[in-house]
Amino acid sequence: MTTTTPNTVAGFRPVLLLTGGYLTLSVLTLIVIVLFRDNHTMVTDAVWVRATIVVASSLLTFSFARSAARGSRKGLLRLRIVAGVMLVAIVVIVALPGLFPLWLRIEQAACGLLLLGVTVLVNSRRLRAR
Protein backbone atom coordinates (compact mmCIF):
# COMPACT_ATOMS: atom_id res chain seq x y z
CA MET A 1 0.00 0.00 0.00
CA THR A 2 1.32 3.44 -0.92
CA THR A 3 0.18 6.58 0.86
CA THR A 4 2.13 9.66 -0.07
CA THR A 5 1.76 12.87 1.89
CA PRO A 6 4.03 15.91 2.03
CA ASN A 7 4.72 14.93 5.64
CA THR A 8 5.93 11.47 4.53
CA VAL A 9 8.27 12.84 1.88
CA ALA A 10 9.66 15.51 4.22
CA GLY A 11 10.24 12.92 6.93
CA PHE A 12 12.33 10.83 4.55
CA ARG A 13 14.54 13.70 3.36
CA PRO A 14 17.42 12.76 5.73
CA VAL A 15 17.13 9.12 4.67
CA LEU A 16 17.24 10.11 1.00
CA LEU A 17 20.30 12.28 1.64
CA LEU A 18 22.11 9.48 3.48
CA THR A 19 21.27 6.83 0.89
CA GLY A 20 22.21 9.25 -1.89
CA GLY A 21 25.54 9.82 -0.16
CA TYR A 22 26.05 6.06 0.10
CA LEU A 23 25.30 5.66 -3.61
CA THR A 24 27.61 8.54 -4.58
CA LEU A 25 30.49 7.29 -2.43
CA SER A 26 30.08 3.75 -3.78
CA VAL A 27 30.11 4.86 -7.41
CA LEU A 28 33.11 7.16 -6.84
CA THR A 29 34.96 4.26 -5.21
CA LEU A 30 34.31 2.07 -8.24
CA ILE A 31 35.63 4.85 -10.48
CA VAL A 32 38.82 5.03 -8.37
CA ILE A 33 39.18 1.26 -8.66
CA VAL A 34 38.90 1.46 -12.44
CA LEU A 35 41.50 4.26 -12.55
CA PHE A 36 43.96 2.33 -10.35
CA ARG A 37 43.22 -1.14 -11.75
CA ASP A 38 46.89 -1.69 -12.67
CA ASN A 39 48.03 -1.19 -9.07
CA HIS A 40 47.57 -4.73 -7.76
CA THR A 41 48.44 -3.76 -4.20
CA MET A 42 45.67 -1.17 -4.10
CA VAL A 43 43.14 -3.00 -6.27
CA THR A 44 42.87 -6.72 -5.60
CA ASP A 45 40.29 -9.16 -6.91
CA ALA A 46 38.52 -8.95 -3.55
CA VAL A 47 38.32 -5.14 -3.92
CA TRP A 48 36.65 -5.53 -7.33
CA VAL A 49 34.10 -7.99 -5.98
CA ARG A 50 33.34 -5.95 -2.87
CA ALA A 51 33.01 -2.66 -4.76
CA THR A 52 30.64 -4.23 -7.28
CA ILE A 53 28.45 -5.62 -4.50
CA VAL A 54 28.45 -2.27 -2.70
CA VAL A 55 27.43 -0.34 -5.83
CA ALA A 56 24.59 -2.80 -6.44
CA SER A 57 23.44 -2.60 -2.82
CA SER A 58 23.66 1.19 -2.81
CA LEU A 59 21.47 1.35 -5.92
CA LEU A 60 18.92 -0.91 -4.23
CA THR A 61 19.12 1.04 -0.98
CA PHE A 62 18.50 4.35 -2.72
CA SER A 63 15.68 2.85 -4.77
CA PHE A 64 14.02 1.44 -1.64
CA ALA A 65 14.43 4.80 0.14
CA ARG A 66 12.67 6.58 -2.73
CA SER A 67 9.89 4.01 -2.66
CA ALA A 68 9.51 4.36 1.11
CA ALA A 69 9.46 8.16 0.80
CA ARG A 70 6.53 7.79 -1.58
CA GLY A 71 4.71 5.88 1.16
CA SER A 72 5.41 2.27 0.21
CA ARG A 73 5.39 -0.04 3.21
CA LYS A 74 7.19 -2.72 1.19
CA GLY A 75 9.81 -0.17 0.22
CA LEU A 76 10.34 0.71 3.87
CA LEU A 77 10.63 -2.95 4.86
CA ARG A 78 13.13 -3.61 2.07
CA LEU A 79 15.11 -0.52 3.05
CA ARG A 80 15.23 -1.62 6.68
CA ILE A 81 16.46 -5.09 5.70
CA VAL A 82 19.07 -4.04 3.13
CA ALA A 83 20.47 -1.21 5.27
CA GLY A 84 20.76 -3.50 8.29
CA VAL A 85 22.37 -6.38 6.40
CA MET A 86 24.87 -4.12 4.64
CA LEU A 87 25.71 -2.38 7.91
CA VAL A 88 26.56 -5.72 9.52
CA ALA A 89 28.63 -6.77 6.48
CA ILE A 90 30.53 -3.48 6.59
CA VAL A 91 31.29 -3.82 10.30
CA VAL A 92 32.77 -7.28 9.62
CA ILE A 93 34.84 -5.99 6.70
CA VAL A 94 36.21 -3.06 8.66
CA ALA A 95 36.98 -5.27 11.68
CA LEU A 96 38.79 -8.07 9.85
CA PRO A 97 42.47 -7.23 9.34
CA GLY A 98 44.17 -8.05 6.06
CA LEU A 99 41.08 -8.93 4.06
CA PHE A 100 41.01 -5.60 2.19
CA PRO A 101 43.48 -2.72 1.76
CA LEU A 102 43.31 0.02 4.39
CA TRP A 103 41.94 2.60 1.93
CA LEU A 104 38.90 0.40 1.17
CA ARG A 105 38.32 -0.33 4.84
CA ILE A 106 38.26 3.44 5.49
CA GLU A 107 35.81 3.94 2.60
CA GLN A 108 33.66 1.12 3.95
CA ALA A 109 33.69 2.71 7.40
CA ALA A 110 32.34 5.91 5.82
CA CYS A 111 29.63 3.88 4.05
CA GLY A 112 28.89 2.19 7.36
CA LEU A 113 28.36 5.54 9.08
CA LEU A 114 25.92 6.58 6.37
CA LEU A 115 24.04 3.28 6.70
CA LEU A 116 24.06 3.54 10.49
CA GLY A 117 22.19 6.83 10.12
CA VAL A 118 19.74 5.22 7.70
CA THR A 119 19.22 2.24 10.00
CA VAL A 120 18.58 4.41 13.04
CA LEU A 121 16.14 6.64 11.14
CA VAL A 122 14.14 3.91 9.41
CA ASN A 123 13.76 1.97 12.63
CA SER A 124 12.58 4.96 14.63
CA ARG A 125 8.95 5.06 15.68
CA ARG A 126 8.55 8.57 14.31
CA LEU A 127 9.53 7.64 10.76
CA ARG A 128 7.70 4.30 10.69
CA ALA A 129 4.53 6.08 11.84
CA ARG A 130 4.64 8.32 8.75
Image (tube, rainbow, N blue to C red):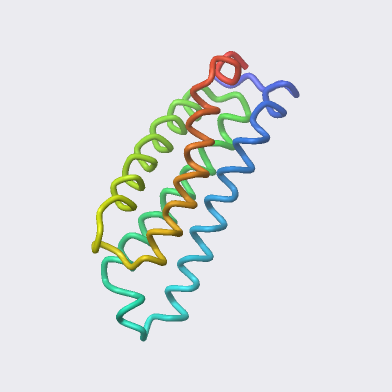
Give whichever of 40, 12 is nearer the camera.
40
Image quadrant containing the N terminus: top right
Measuring from the top left, give residue 120's x and y in whole percent: 50, 28
Residue farthest along the bottom direction in this orientation = 38
Q: Nearer the viewer, residue 87 or 23?
A: 87
Task: Say if 48 sits above or below 122 in the image.
Answer: below
Task: Answer above or below: position of 85 versus 111.
Answer: above
Quarter where residue 80 is shown: top left
Q: Is residue 13 left or right of residue 21?
A: right
Front-most of 43 and 99?
99
The image quarter containing residue 100 is bottom left
Q: Give the residue drawn at x 59%, y 43%.
A: 18
Rendered position, 28 above or below 5: below
Q: Please give left or right for residue 17 compared with residue 114 in the image.
A: right
> Image point 59% across, 48% down: which residue?
20
Count of number-bearing discs: 0
Q: Residue at 34% across / 52% down in the picture?
A: 94
User: In the figure, 38 relative to 73: above or below?
Assistant: below
Residue placed most toward the observer, 18 or 130:
18
Left of 31 or right of it: where is 10?
A: right
Q: Position of residue 14 (x, y in %)?
A: 65, 36
Percent x, y for residue 119? 48, 32
In the rendering, at what x and y percent does residue 29 appear? 48, 65
Q: For this view, does 22 lie left or right of residue 78?
A: right
Position of the C terminus, as image quadrant, is top right
**Which residue: 39% across, 63% down?**
104
